[in-house]
Amino acid sequence: MIRLILSDVDGTITHRDRRIDVAAIEAIRKAIGRGILVSLVSGNVIPVMYGLEVFIGLNAPAFAENGGCYIMKEHVEAFFSKEKPEEFLRHIERITSAYGIFSNAWRLTSMGFGMREDDEERVREEAKKFGVTVTNSGYSWHILNPGQDKAFAFRKLMEMYSLEKDEILVIGDSENDMPMFREAVHSACVGTNEVLMSMAETVTSGKNSSGFVEALGKYGIV
Amino acid sequence: MIRLILSDVDGTITHRDRRIDVAAIEAIRKAIGRGILVSLVSGNVIPVMYGLEVFIGLNAPAFAENGGCYIMKEHVEAFFSKEKPEEFLRHIERITSAYGIFSNAWRLTSMGFGMREDDEERVREEAKKFGVTVTNSGYSWHILNPGQDKAFAFRKLMEMYSLEKDEILVIGDSENDMPMFREAVHSACVGTNEVLMSMAETVTSGKNSSGFVEALGKYGIV
Protein backbone atom coordinates (compact mmCIF):
# COMPACT_ATOMS: atom_id res chain seq x y z
CA MET A 1 0.00 0.00 0.00
CA ILE A 2 1.29 3.47 -0.93
CA ARG A 3 1.76 5.63 2.18
CA LEU A 4 3.84 8.42 0.62
CA ILE A 5 4.07 10.06 -2.79
CA LEU A 6 7.37 11.72 -3.67
CA SER A 7 6.89 13.85 -6.75
CA ASP A 8 8.93 16.16 -8.92
CA VAL A 9 7.43 19.62 -9.60
CA ASP A 10 8.23 21.19 -13.01
CA GLY A 11 6.80 19.11 -15.84
CA THR A 12 5.25 16.66 -13.36
CA ILE A 13 2.59 18.57 -11.39
CA THR A 14 2.79 21.39 -13.95
CA HIS A 15 1.99 21.61 -17.62
CA ARG A 16 4.98 21.58 -19.97
CA ASP A 17 5.15 25.42 -19.72
CA ARG A 18 5.58 25.27 -15.90
CA ARG A 19 2.06 26.52 -15.10
CA ILE A 20 0.72 24.37 -12.27
CA ASP A 21 -2.17 22.06 -13.17
CA VAL A 22 -5.20 22.64 -10.95
CA ALA A 23 -6.15 18.95 -11.46
CA ALA A 24 -2.78 17.97 -9.95
CA ILE A 25 -3.39 20.25 -6.94
CA GLU A 26 -6.80 18.66 -6.46
CA ALA A 27 -5.38 15.13 -6.76
CA ILE A 28 -2.69 15.95 -4.17
CA ARG A 29 -5.30 17.35 -1.76
CA LYS A 30 -7.48 14.29 -2.25
CA ALA A 31 -4.50 11.99 -1.48
CA ILE A 32 -3.71 14.02 1.64
CA GLY A 33 -7.38 13.85 2.67
CA ARG A 34 -7.04 10.05 2.52
CA GLY A 35 -4.10 10.11 4.91
CA ILE A 36 -1.33 9.77 2.35
CA LEU A 37 1.85 11.79 2.81
CA VAL A 38 2.75 13.99 -0.14
CA SER A 39 6.32 15.26 -0.48
CA LEU A 40 7.71 17.27 -3.39
CA VAL A 41 11.32 17.31 -4.59
CA SER A 42 12.56 19.85 -7.08
CA GLY A 43 15.70 21.54 -8.37
CA ASN A 44 14.10 24.82 -7.29
CA VAL A 45 14.96 26.84 -4.15
CA ILE A 46 13.65 26.72 -0.56
CA PRO A 47 11.43 29.85 -0.66
CA VAL A 48 9.72 28.66 -3.84
CA MET A 49 9.14 25.25 -2.24
CA TYR A 50 7.88 27.07 0.88
CA GLY A 51 5.27 28.79 -1.30
CA LEU A 52 4.22 25.43 -2.78
CA GLU A 53 4.03 23.87 0.69
CA VAL A 54 1.71 26.61 1.96
CA PHE A 55 -0.37 27.23 -1.17
CA ILE A 56 -0.94 23.52 -1.95
CA GLY A 57 -1.11 22.52 1.73
CA LEU A 58 1.46 19.70 1.90
CA ASN A 59 1.77 17.34 4.88
CA ALA A 60 5.40 16.21 4.36
CA PRO A 61 8.71 17.97 3.60
CA ALA A 62 9.19 19.94 0.40
CA PHE A 63 12.74 19.23 -0.82
CA ALA A 64 14.60 21.92 -2.74
CA GLU A 65 17.84 21.80 -4.74
CA ASN A 66 17.35 18.17 -5.86
CA GLY A 67 17.20 16.86 -2.30
CA GLY A 68 19.97 18.99 -0.80
CA CYS A 69 17.63 20.66 1.69
CA TYR A 70 13.98 20.71 2.71
CA ILE A 71 11.40 22.91 4.31
CA MET A 72 8.54 21.76 6.52
CA LYS A 73 6.36 24.12 8.55
CA GLU A 74 8.91 26.95 8.42
CA HIS A 75 11.74 24.66 9.47
CA VAL A 76 14.63 24.45 6.98
CA GLU A 77 17.12 21.57 7.04
CA ALA A 78 20.22 21.66 4.77
CA PHE A 79 22.32 18.52 4.22
CA PHE A 80 25.04 19.84 1.96
CA SER A 81 27.02 23.04 1.33
CA LYS A 82 26.97 25.23 -1.77
CA GLU A 83 30.72 25.87 -1.60
CA LYS A 84 31.88 23.26 -4.12
CA PRO A 85 28.98 23.82 -6.59
CA GLU A 86 29.72 27.57 -6.47
CA GLU A 87 33.40 26.98 -7.16
CA PHE A 88 32.58 24.67 -10.09
CA LEU A 89 30.15 27.22 -11.53
CA ARG A 90 32.87 29.89 -11.52
CA HIS A 91 35.17 27.40 -13.21
CA ILE A 92 32.83 26.52 -16.10
CA GLU A 93 31.75 30.15 -16.50
CA ARG A 94 35.40 30.86 -17.31
CA ILE A 95 35.91 28.08 -19.85
CA THR A 96 32.47 27.46 -21.43
CA SER A 97 29.21 29.30 -22.28
CA ALA A 98 27.75 28.34 -18.85
CA TYR A 99 26.07 31.10 -16.82
CA GLY A 100 24.47 31.07 -13.35
CA ILE A 101 20.69 31.31 -13.21
CA PHE A 102 18.46 33.84 -11.50
CA SER A 103 17.43 31.69 -8.54
CA ASN A 104 21.04 31.07 -7.38
CA ALA A 105 20.63 34.02 -4.97
CA TRP A 106 18.43 31.79 -2.79
CA ARG A 107 20.44 28.54 -3.04
CA LEU A 108 21.93 26.84 0.01
CA THR A 109 23.42 23.59 -1.32
CA SER A 110 23.74 23.74 -5.12
CA MET A 111 23.97 26.01 -8.16
CA GLY A 112 21.80 26.24 -11.25
CA PHE A 113 23.08 27.14 -14.69
CA GLY A 114 22.33 27.37 -18.37
CA MET A 115 24.67 26.81 -21.36
CA ARG A 116 24.85 26.27 -25.09
CA GLU A 117 23.98 22.68 -26.00
CA ASP A 118 27.38 21.98 -27.56
CA ASP A 119 29.09 22.60 -24.20
CA GLU A 120 27.29 19.75 -22.46
CA GLU A 121 29.98 17.12 -23.02
CA ARG A 122 32.78 19.45 -21.90
CA VAL A 123 30.88 20.45 -18.73
CA ARG A 124 30.09 16.81 -17.89
CA GLU A 125 33.80 15.93 -18.23
CA GLU A 126 34.89 18.86 -16.08
CA ALA A 127 32.32 17.86 -13.44
CA LYS A 128 33.81 14.38 -13.24
CA LYS A 129 37.30 15.80 -12.74
CA PHE A 130 35.98 18.26 -10.16
CA GLY A 131 33.98 15.70 -8.15
CA VAL A 132 30.53 17.26 -8.57
CA THR A 133 27.41 16.03 -10.35
CA VAL A 134 25.66 17.94 -13.11
CA THR A 135 22.09 17.04 -13.95
CA ASN A 136 19.29 18.46 -16.07
CA SER A 137 15.74 18.97 -14.81
CA GLY A 138 14.47 19.75 -18.29
CA TYR A 139 14.17 23.38 -17.16
CA SER A 140 17.75 24.09 -16.10
CA TRP A 141 21.08 22.48 -15.25
CA HIS A 142 22.11 21.85 -11.65
CA ILE A 143 25.49 21.39 -9.96
CA LEU A 144 25.24 19.06 -6.97
CA ASN A 145 27.52 17.64 -4.31
CA PRO A 146 28.39 13.90 -4.36
CA GLY A 147 25.45 12.00 -2.87
CA GLN A 148 23.04 14.93 -3.35
CA ASP A 149 20.14 13.74 -5.46
CA LYS A 150 16.50 12.76 -5.29
CA ALA A 151 17.43 9.30 -3.93
CA PHE A 152 18.84 11.10 -0.89
CA ALA A 153 15.40 12.69 -0.35
CA PHE A 154 13.78 9.27 -0.86
CA ARG A 155 15.93 7.66 1.86
CA LYS A 156 15.46 10.65 4.19
CA LEU A 157 11.68 10.21 3.95
CA MET A 158 11.92 6.44 4.61
CA GLU A 159 13.82 7.25 7.78
CA MET A 160 11.56 10.13 8.92
CA TYR A 161 8.33 8.18 8.53
CA SER A 162 9.65 4.60 9.07
CA LEU A 163 8.55 3.56 5.59
CA GLU A 164 9.37 0.48 3.56
CA LYS A 165 10.50 1.04 -0.03
CA ASP A 166 7.33 -0.43 -1.46
CA GLU A 167 5.17 2.06 0.46
CA ILE A 168 6.50 4.96 -1.62
CA LEU A 169 5.43 6.04 -5.11
CA VAL A 170 7.84 8.31 -6.97
CA ILE A 171 6.72 10.40 -9.95
CA GLY A 172 8.89 12.41 -12.33
CA ASP A 173 9.66 13.32 -15.91
CA SER A 174 13.36 13.86 -16.51
CA GLU A 175 17.04 13.12 -15.95
CA ASN A 176 17.29 14.46 -12.41
CA ASP A 177 14.50 12.07 -11.35
CA MET A 178 16.58 8.98 -12.21
CA PRO A 179 18.23 8.52 -8.80
CA MET A 180 14.86 8.22 -7.02
CA PHE A 181 13.53 5.93 -9.75
CA ARG A 182 16.57 3.68 -9.19
CA GLU A 183 15.77 3.56 -5.45
CA ALA A 184 12.01 3.06 -5.74
CA VAL A 185 9.84 -0.02 -6.14
CA HIS A 186 6.87 1.96 -7.43
CA SER A 187 7.56 4.69 -9.97
CA ALA A 188 5.65 6.53 -12.67
CA CYS A 189 7.30 8.37 -15.55
CA VAL A 190 5.18 11.21 -16.95
CA GLY A 191 7.82 12.52 -19.37
CA THR A 192 9.43 11.48 -22.63
CA ASN A 193 12.97 10.79 -21.42
CA GLU A 194 13.69 7.32 -22.88
CA VAL A 195 16.02 6.24 -20.08
CA LEU A 196 13.60 7.29 -17.35
CA MET A 197 10.77 5.50 -19.15
CA SER A 198 12.84 2.31 -19.22
CA MET A 199 13.46 2.58 -15.47
CA ALA A 200 9.83 3.23 -14.50
CA GLU A 201 7.35 0.68 -13.19
CA THR A 202 4.61 2.68 -14.93
CA VAL A 203 4.77 4.93 -17.99
CA THR A 204 1.66 7.09 -18.20
CA SER A 205 -0.02 7.72 -21.53
CA GLY A 206 -0.81 11.32 -20.57
CA LYS A 207 2.32 13.46 -20.27
CA ASN A 208 3.37 15.92 -17.55
CA SER A 209 0.62 16.81 -15.04
CA SER A 210 -2.08 14.80 -16.82
CA GLY A 211 0.23 11.79 -16.38
CA PHE A 212 0.55 12.67 -12.69
CA VAL A 213 -3.22 12.52 -12.17
CA GLU A 214 -3.34 9.32 -14.26
CA ALA A 215 -0.63 7.72 -12.08
CA LEU A 216 -2.48 8.49 -8.85
CA GLY A 217 -5.51 6.80 -10.36
CA LYS A 218 -3.52 3.73 -11.47
CA TYR A 219 -2.12 3.24 -7.97
CA GLY A 220 -5.62 3.52 -6.47
CA ILE A 221 -4.78 6.71 -4.58
CA VAL A 222 -7.49 8.99 -6.02
CA MET B 1 -13.60 48.76 -18.89
CA ILE B 2 -11.26 46.85 -16.57
CA ARG B 3 -7.84 46.38 -18.18
CA LEU B 4 -5.91 45.30 -15.07
CA ILE B 5 -6.70 43.38 -11.88
CA LEU B 6 -4.51 44.10 -8.87
CA SER B 7 -5.17 41.46 -6.23
CA ASP B 8 -3.92 40.57 -2.78
CA VAL B 9 -2.84 36.93 -2.27
CA ASP B 10 -3.40 35.46 1.23
CA GLY B 11 -7.10 35.34 2.07
CA THR B 12 -8.00 36.74 -1.37
CA ILE B 13 -6.96 34.14 -3.96
CA THR B 14 -6.54 31.58 -1.16
CA HIS B 15 -8.93 29.99 1.28
CA ARG B 16 -8.83 31.37 4.83
CA ASP B 17 -6.13 28.78 5.70
CA ARG B 18 -3.78 30.11 2.93
CA ARG B 19 -4.27 27.14 0.59
CA ILE B 20 -4.68 28.52 -2.92
CA ASP B 21 -8.14 28.11 -4.46
CA VAL B 22 -8.00 26.30 -7.79
CA ALA B 23 -11.13 28.22 -8.87
CA ALA B 24 -9.21 31.48 -8.34
CA ILE B 25 -6.30 30.19 -10.47
CA GLU B 26 -8.75 29.26 -13.20
CA ALA B 27 -10.48 32.66 -13.03
CA ILE B 28 -7.11 34.45 -13.28
CA ARG B 29 -6.11 32.36 -16.31
CA LYS B 30 -9.46 33.04 -17.96
CA ALA B 31 -9.00 36.79 -17.39
CA ILE B 32 -5.49 36.63 -18.86
CA GLY B 33 -6.84 34.66 -21.81
CA ARG B 34 -9.20 37.57 -22.44
CA GLY B 35 -6.31 40.03 -22.59
CA ILE B 36 -6.62 41.42 -19.06
CA LEU B 37 -3.45 42.11 -17.09
CA VAL B 38 -3.31 40.36 -13.72
CA SER B 39 -0.90 41.64 -11.08
CA LEU B 40 -0.59 40.36 -7.50
CA VAL B 41 0.52 42.36 -4.47
CA SER B 42 1.33 40.69 -1.17
CA GLY B 43 3.23 41.16 2.07
CA ASN B 44 5.17 38.03 1.11
CA VAL B 45 8.71 37.91 -0.34
CA ILE B 46 10.07 38.05 -3.91
CA PRO B 47 10.91 34.33 -4.34
CA VAL B 48 7.44 33.29 -3.15
CA MET B 49 5.88 35.78 -5.60
CA TYR B 50 8.25 34.44 -8.26
CA GLY B 51 6.77 30.98 -7.66
CA LEU B 52 3.24 32.36 -7.99
CA GLU B 53 4.16 34.24 -11.16
CA VAL B 54 5.51 31.08 -12.81
CA PHE B 55 3.05 28.51 -11.46
CA ILE B 56 -0.08 30.63 -12.10
CA GLY B 57 1.34 32.16 -15.28
CA LEU B 58 0.91 35.90 -14.64
CA ASN B 59 1.27 38.55 -17.37
CA ALA B 60 2.05 41.56 -15.12
CA PRO B 61 4.40 42.24 -12.17
CA ALA B 62 4.05 40.31 -8.92
CA PHE B 63 4.65 42.81 -6.11
CA ALA B 64 6.19 41.58 -2.86
CA GLU B 65 6.57 43.26 0.53
CA ASN B 66 3.35 45.30 0.24
CA GLY B 67 4.49 47.03 -2.96
CA GLY B 68 8.12 47.63 -1.97
CA CYS B 69 9.47 45.54 -4.86
CA TYR B 70 8.27 43.44 -7.74
CA ILE B 71 9.32 40.59 -9.95
CA MET B 72 8.44 40.11 -13.59
CA LYS B 73 10.06 37.51 -15.86
CA GLU B 74 13.07 37.06 -13.56
CA HIS B 75 13.63 40.81 -13.30
CA VAL B 76 13.48 42.20 -9.74
CA GLU B 77 12.90 45.90 -9.07
CA ALA B 78 13.18 47.26 -5.49
CA PHE B 79 11.90 50.75 -4.63
CA PHE B 80 12.80 51.00 -0.95
CA SER B 81 15.49 49.79 1.47
CA LYS B 82 15.07 47.40 4.39
CA GLU B 83 17.44 49.40 6.60
CA LYS B 84 14.87 51.40 8.58
CA PRO B 85 12.37 48.52 8.96
CA GLU B 86 15.21 46.30 10.22
CA GLU B 87 16.28 48.92 12.74
CA PHE B 88 12.69 49.32 13.96
CA LEU B 89 12.27 45.56 14.30
CA ARG B 90 15.37 45.36 16.52
CA HIS B 91 13.93 48.24 18.57
CA ILE B 92 10.52 46.66 19.23
CA GLU B 93 12.08 43.23 19.82
CA ARG B 94 13.89 44.84 22.74
CA ILE B 95 10.88 46.56 24.32
CA THR B 96 7.85 44.40 23.36
CA SER B 97 6.92 40.78 22.61
CA ALA B 98 7.56 41.38 18.87
CA TYR B 99 9.66 38.82 17.00
CA GLY B 100 10.85 38.68 13.37
CA ILE B 101 9.21 36.10 11.12
CA PHE B 102 10.71 33.28 9.15
CA SER B 103 10.54 34.91 5.71
CA ASN B 104 12.62 37.94 6.73
CA ALA B 105 15.69 36.15 5.37
CA TRP B 106 14.43 36.90 1.85
CA ARG B 107 13.19 40.47 2.39
CA LEU B 108 14.63 43.42 0.46
CA THR B 109 12.51 46.41 1.56
CA SER B 110 10.56 45.55 4.73
CA MET B 111 10.38 43.29 7.79
CA GLY B 112 7.65 40.97 9.00
CA PHE B 113 6.87 40.28 12.62
CA GLY B 114 4.50 38.72 15.12
CA MET B 115 3.58 39.89 18.63
CA ARG B 116 1.14 39.45 21.51
CA GLU B 117 -2.12 41.28 20.81
CA ASP B 118 -1.76 43.58 23.83
CA ASP B 119 1.44 45.05 22.37
CA GLU B 120 -0.29 46.39 19.25
CA GLU B 121 -0.97 49.88 20.60
CA ARG B 122 2.57 50.27 21.93
CA VAL B 123 4.11 49.14 18.63
CA ARG B 124 1.86 51.47 16.61
CA GLU B 125 2.93 54.41 18.81
CA GLU B 126 6.61 53.52 18.51
CA ALA B 127 6.24 53.25 14.72
CA LYS B 128 4.86 56.80 14.55
CA LYS B 129 7.80 58.13 16.54
CA PHE B 130 10.22 56.14 14.40
CA GLY B 131 8.75 57.20 11.05
CA VAL B 132 7.79 53.75 9.73
CA THR B 133 4.40 52.20 9.01
CA VAL B 134 3.15 49.00 10.61
CA THR B 135 0.30 47.13 8.97
CA ASN B 136 -1.40 43.78 9.34
CA SER B 137 -2.12 41.43 6.44
CA GLY B 138 -4.28 39.19 8.62
CA TYR B 139 -1.42 36.65 8.45
CA SER B 140 1.44 38.71 9.87
CA TRP B 141 2.54 42.23 10.74
CA HIS B 142 4.74 44.24 8.40
CA ILE B 143 7.11 47.17 8.91
CA LEU B 144 7.22 49.45 5.88
CA ASN B 145 8.98 52.62 4.78
CA PRO B 146 6.99 55.85 4.40
CA GLY B 147 5.14 55.71 1.07
CA GLN B 148 5.56 51.93 0.78
CA ASP B 149 2.12 50.40 0.43
CA LYS B 150 -0.22 48.79 -2.06
CA ALA B 151 -1.21 52.24 -3.41
CA PHE B 152 2.41 52.60 -4.52
CA ALA B 153 2.04 49.38 -6.53
CA PHE B 154 -1.26 50.68 -7.94
CA ARG B 155 0.34 53.92 -9.20
CA LYS B 156 3.38 52.04 -10.53
CA LEU B 157 1.08 49.86 -12.65
CA MET B 158 -0.86 52.91 -13.94
CA GLU B 159 2.46 54.33 -15.10
CA MET B 160 3.84 51.09 -16.57
CA TYR B 161 0.75 50.34 -18.63
CA SER B 162 -0.59 53.91 -19.16
CA LEU B 163 -3.82 53.08 -17.38
CA GLU B 164 -6.58 55.34 -16.08
CA LYS B 165 -7.71 54.75 -12.50
CA ASP B 166 -11.08 53.42 -13.59
CA GLU B 167 -9.44 50.72 -15.74
CA ILE B 168 -8.10 48.94 -12.64
CA LEU B 169 -9.96 46.60 -10.29
CA VAL B 170 -8.37 46.04 -6.87
CA ILE B 171 -9.31 43.05 -4.70
CA GLY B 172 -8.32 42.42 -1.11
CA ASP B 173 -9.46 41.36 2.34
CA SER B 174 -7.61 43.19 5.12
CA GLU B 175 -5.91 46.24 6.62
CA ASN B 176 -2.87 46.30 4.35
CA ASP B 177 -5.18 46.50 1.31
CA MET B 178 -6.65 49.86 2.42
CA PRO B 179 -4.13 52.10 0.61
CA MET B 180 -4.97 50.59 -2.79
CA PHE B 181 -8.70 50.73 -2.02
CA ARG B 182 -8.31 54.46 -1.25
CA GLU B 183 -6.61 54.95 -4.64
CA ALA B 184 -8.97 52.83 -6.71
CA VAL B 185 -12.26 53.57 -8.43
CA HIS B 186 -13.22 49.90 -8.66
CA SER B 187 -12.59 47.73 -5.61
CA ALA B 188 -13.94 44.50 -4.18
CA CYS B 189 -13.59 43.52 -0.53
CA VAL B 190 -13.64 39.74 0.03
CA GLY B 191 -12.88 39.88 3.77
CA THR B 192 -14.66 40.85 6.96
CA ASN B 193 -12.62 43.94 7.91
CA GLU B 194 -15.35 46.55 8.61
CA VAL B 195 -13.25 49.53 7.51
CA LEU B 196 -12.20 47.90 4.25
CA MET B 197 -15.80 46.91 3.56
CA SER B 198 -16.87 50.55 4.03
CA MET B 199 -14.20 51.68 1.55
CA ALA B 200 -15.03 49.12 -1.15
CA GLU B 201 -17.15 49.69 -4.24
CA THR B 202 -18.23 46.05 -3.98
CA VAL B 203 -18.48 43.77 -0.97
CA THR B 204 -18.76 40.16 -2.06
CA SER B 205 -21.14 37.79 -0.30
CA GLY B 206 -18.67 34.91 -0.57
CA LYS B 207 -15.55 35.44 1.51
CA ASN B 208 -11.87 35.01 0.61
CA SER B 209 -11.21 33.23 -2.70
CA SER B 210 -14.89 32.52 -3.40
CA GLY B 211 -15.41 36.29 -3.14
CA PHE B 212 -12.56 36.77 -5.61
CA VAL B 213 -14.24 34.59 -8.22
CA GLU B 214 -17.57 36.31 -7.48
CA ALA B 215 -15.98 39.76 -7.99
CA LEU B 216 -14.52 38.80 -11.38
CA GLY B 217 -18.00 37.70 -12.39
CA LYS B 218 -19.61 40.94 -11.14
CA TYR B 219 -17.20 43.07 -13.16
CA GLY B 220 -17.92 40.98 -16.27
CA ILE B 221 -14.35 39.70 -16.47
CA VAL B 222 -15.10 35.95 -16.37
Image: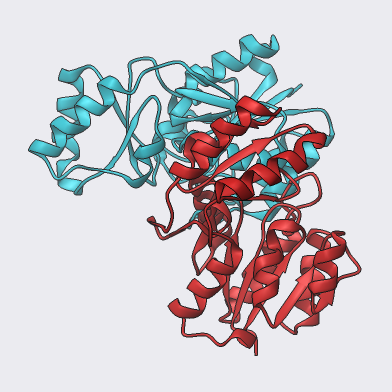
Chain colours: A red, B cyan
Q: Is residue A143 left or right of residue B83?
A: right
The quarter of the rendered structure image containing the N terminus of chain B is top right
User: How many numbered discs?
Assistant: 0
Which residue extends farthest front?
Answer: A129
Q: Nearer the viewer, residue B117 or A3?
A: A3
Farthest-out residue, right: A205
Task: Report x, y in % for residue A87.
Answer: 49, 37
Instruction: Look at the image and tell me whether residue B172 can be seen.
Output: no
The residue located at (73%, 33%) in the rendering is A115
Residue at horizontal 15%, vertical 27%? B125
What residue do we see at 55% from left, 19% from top?
Answer: B154
Left or right of A206: which side holds A184? left
Give the farthest residue toward the left.
B95
B96 vs B60, left or right, is: left
Q: Quadrant of residue B133?
A: top left
Q: Give the vertical position of B72 relative to B113 (above or below).
A: above
Q: Going by the picture, which residue comes out furthest to the bottom?
A: A1
Q: Position of residue A89 (x, y in %)?
A: 57, 35
Between B142 and A28, the one nearer to me in the picture:
A28
**Measuring 71% from the left and 27% from the top, which residue is drawn there?**
A97
- Image quadrant where one finds the C terminus of chain B: top right
Image vertical order of residue B142 relative to residue A3, above or below: above
Relative image position of residue A213 (x, y in whole percent): 78, 69
Q: Can residue A203 be seen here?
A: yes
Q: Residue A104, percent across and down?
A: 53, 36
Q: Name the side, left or right, on which A26 lies relative to A88.
A: right
